[in-house]
């Protein structure tokens, strides 16, 4: 019962066009990755003000918590390793 490792999966994605296509259309393909500092700079360059880091459950948008965008039905954050920032324009 051999389970593929992350390395084996990455190699398969690099060499199998069907796997690459499925991954790229799965909604999980990230073309860019930012840290808090670089995303804040990018938002400033785009004209946003009042930029701040926040949490999945909170925003300056009224009643934001009711939308439960990144919160599972049990109240847990869906992807706890994500970070959240917002700004105003």
Image (tube, grey):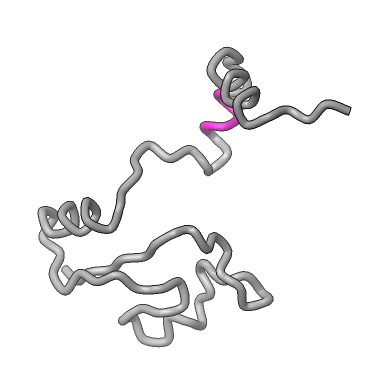
Q: Is residue 21 magenta?
A: yes
Residue drawn where x is 53% and y is 74% of the image: 68
Q: Is residue 41 left or right of residue 21?
A: left
Q: How many marks?
A: 0
Q: Position of residue 1 (x, y in %)?
A: 89, 28
Q: Is residue 35 above or below residue 68?
A: above
Q: Is residue 51 magenta?
A: no
- Determine the residue located farthest toward the right in the rendered image: 1
Q: Is residue 77 left or right of residue 62?
A: right
Q: Is residue 36 left or right of residue 9?
A: left
Front residue of 57 and 1: 1
Q: Is residue 70 above or below residue 17?
A: below
Q: Is residue 63 above or below residue 88?
A: below
* Range of magenta residues: 20-24
Q: Is residue 84 above or below residue 59?
A: above
Q: Position of residue 42 (x, y in %)?
A: 18, 52
Residue drawn where x is 28% and y is 68% of the image: 86
Q: Is residue 13 left or right of residue 45?
A: right
- Determine the residue located farthest toward the bottom in the rendered image: 63
Front residue of 6 and 18: 6
Q: Position of residue 2 (x, y in %)?
A: 83, 26
Residue drawn where x is 16% and y is 68% of the image: 89
What secondary structure characterizes most of the magenta part?
helix
Determine which quarter of the picture holds residue 71: bottom right
Q: Position of residue 77 (x, y in %)?
A: 56, 69
Determine which quarter of the picture holds residue 49: bottom left
């Amino acid at each position: 019962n051999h389970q593929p490792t992350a390395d084996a999966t990455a190699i398969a994605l690099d060499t199998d066009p069907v796997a690459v296509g499925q991954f790229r259309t799965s909604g999980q393909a990230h073309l860019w990755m930012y840290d808090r500092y670089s995303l804040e700079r990018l938002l400033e360059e785009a004209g946003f003000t009042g930029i701040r880091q926040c949490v999945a459950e909170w925003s300056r948008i009224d009643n934001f918590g009711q939308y439960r965008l990144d919160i599972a039905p049990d109240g847990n954050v869906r992807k706890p390793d994500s970070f959240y920032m917002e700004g105003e324009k």
